[in-house]
Image: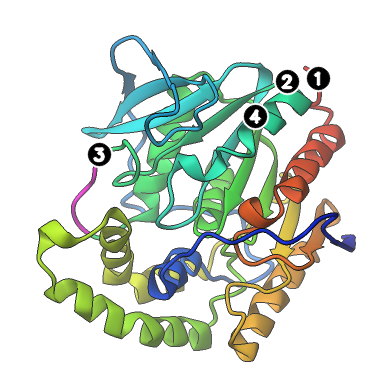
């Protein structure tokens, strides 16, 4: 494991404003023990069955996609449609997965630069209930989120040597997806991601308590007034504690290398104990295997893709080089 600090060349950019409760629930959807076996989904997980809808359409940037001339594919999995945006390029594909309460547009400033520098196919997507994807009623289930990602990548033919880039909440999806099919992924870049090591019983309790008032306020609101991010918060909160205890047993497959980027401010700039726990989890995860490398993004908030897109692009390029995937 190697660690270094990267500092910005220019002035610090303004961060996307995200509601604290929604950010907490979106970020902290994972916790686990080091040294466990490869991740496995709960027994209720079902195989992905996906179909691609009518001919793909061009994403002109008016929707929630990347707006880079990419192609929009509406892919159906288990009865609901999911929006996948594909910027053409060579294989292997680079897949970008945004954090809780966010959709594929989160990556719109990274995709053009990434496509130009790597020449790779770039895939972004909207998870169920976000962006242009259909909502799915009921509590959020990680096995369903993994099934949706797998279904989309299968339908798009991105099933080998994929580079997976996961921000925040998407770290949990990445952990289970790589655990289920490590042969599909050449490597990953985890961007201030929710890692199994973070959510100890103490942190699970703190997050649940911190979001309780907001959750109750949202439950009291008229459904028509709820935003997509509000609905995701409610869906995640429904089974938050047992879900995190289950995730506590998950581990990352040793054969899939990872570049880990942690923000200097962490998701908890005003809470020293939580910030320390977050940094400790990132360090612990990165230190478990020789094929994991840790980078701290100096002067960055949790929104590293917004504050420091250069670091994200650089670490993706580094992973492509390290895995021999560049220029294929």
Residue numbers of the magenta segment: 134-138
Query: Is 168 positioned to the left or the right of 228 in the image?
Result: right
What coloring was used for the rendering?
Answer: rainbow
Q: Which mark is residue 134?
A: 3
Q: Which residue is drawn at 47% across and 27% down?
A: 85
Q: Which of marks 1 and 4 is nearer the N terminus?
A: 4
- Seen as rendered, the residue at the extreme front is 11
Quick check: 164 left or right of 72?
A: right
- The Cα–Cα distance between marks 3 and 4, rounded to whole angstroms, is 26 Å
Q: Residue 99 carries which label?
A: none
Q: Are marks 4 and 2 in contact (CB under 8 Å)?
A: no
The disc, 3 or 1, on the residue closer to the chain's N-terminal end is: 3
Question: Does 72 sit above or below residue 269?
Answer: above
**Which badge, 2 or 3, comes first in the chain's sequence?**
2
165 left or right of 71 in image: right
Q: How far apart are marks 3 and 1 (CA)?
A: 35 Å
Mark 3 vs mark 4, foreground winner is: 4
Q: Which of marks 1 and 2 is nearer the N terminus?
A: 2
Residue in front for this viewpoint, 130 or 12 = 12
Label placed on residue 119: 2
Q: Say whether marks 2 and 3 touch (CB < 8 Å).
A: no
Q: Which residue position is annotated with label 4?
A: 112
List x then y, in percent, for residue 82.
33, 33
Cα gap from disc 4 to disc 2, whole angstroms: 10 Å
Q: Distance between the residues labelled 2 and 3?
A: 31 Å
Mark 2 neighbour density, 10 Å: few (under 14) some (14–19) many (20 or more): some
Q: Quadrant of residue 18?
A: bottom left
State the CA–CA distance, disc 1 to disc 2.
7 Å
Q: Residue at x 36, y 80 (%)?
A: 211
């Amino acid at each position: 494991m190697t660690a270094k600090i990267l500092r910005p060349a220019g002035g610090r950019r303004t961060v996307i404003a995200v509601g604290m409760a929604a950010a907490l629930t979106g970020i902290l959807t994972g916790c686990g023990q080091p040294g466990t076996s490869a991740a496995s989904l709960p027994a209720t997980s079902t195989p992905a069955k996906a179909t691609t809808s009518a001919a793909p359409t061009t994403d002109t940037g008016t929707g929630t996609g990347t707006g880079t001339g990419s192609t929009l594919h509406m892919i159906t999995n288990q009865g609901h449609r999911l929006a996948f945006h594909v910027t053409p390029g060579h294989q292997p594909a680079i897949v970008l997965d945004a954090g809780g309460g966010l959709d594929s547009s989160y990556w719109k400033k990274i995709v053009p630069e990434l496509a130009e520098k790597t020449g790779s196919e770039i895939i972004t997507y909207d998870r169920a209930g976000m962006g242009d994807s259909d909502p799915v009623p009921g509590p959020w289930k990680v096995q369903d989120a993994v099934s949706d990602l797998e279904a989309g990548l299968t339908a798009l033919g991105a099933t080998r040597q994929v580079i997976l880039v996961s921000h925040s909440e998407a770290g949990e999806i990445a952990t289970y997806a790589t655990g289920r099919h490590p042969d599909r992924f050449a490597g990953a870049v985890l961007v201030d991601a929710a890692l199994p090591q973070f959510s100890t019983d103490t942190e699970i309790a703190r997050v649940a308590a911190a979001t309780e008032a907001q959750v109750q306020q949202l439950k009291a609101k008229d459904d028509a007034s709820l935003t997509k991010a509000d609905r995701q918060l409610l869906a995640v909160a429904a089974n938050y504690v047992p879900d995190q205890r289950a995730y506590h047993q998950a581990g990352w497959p040793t054969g899939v290398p990872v570049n880990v980027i942690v923000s200097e401010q962490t998701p908890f700039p005003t809470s020293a104990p939580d910030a320390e726990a977050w940094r400790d989890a990132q360090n612990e995860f990165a230190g478990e295997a020789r094929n994991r490398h840790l980078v701290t993004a100096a002067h960055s908030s949790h929104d590293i893709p917004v504050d420091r897109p250069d670091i994200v692009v650089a670490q993706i390029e580094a992973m492509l080089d390290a895995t021999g995937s560049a220029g294929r």
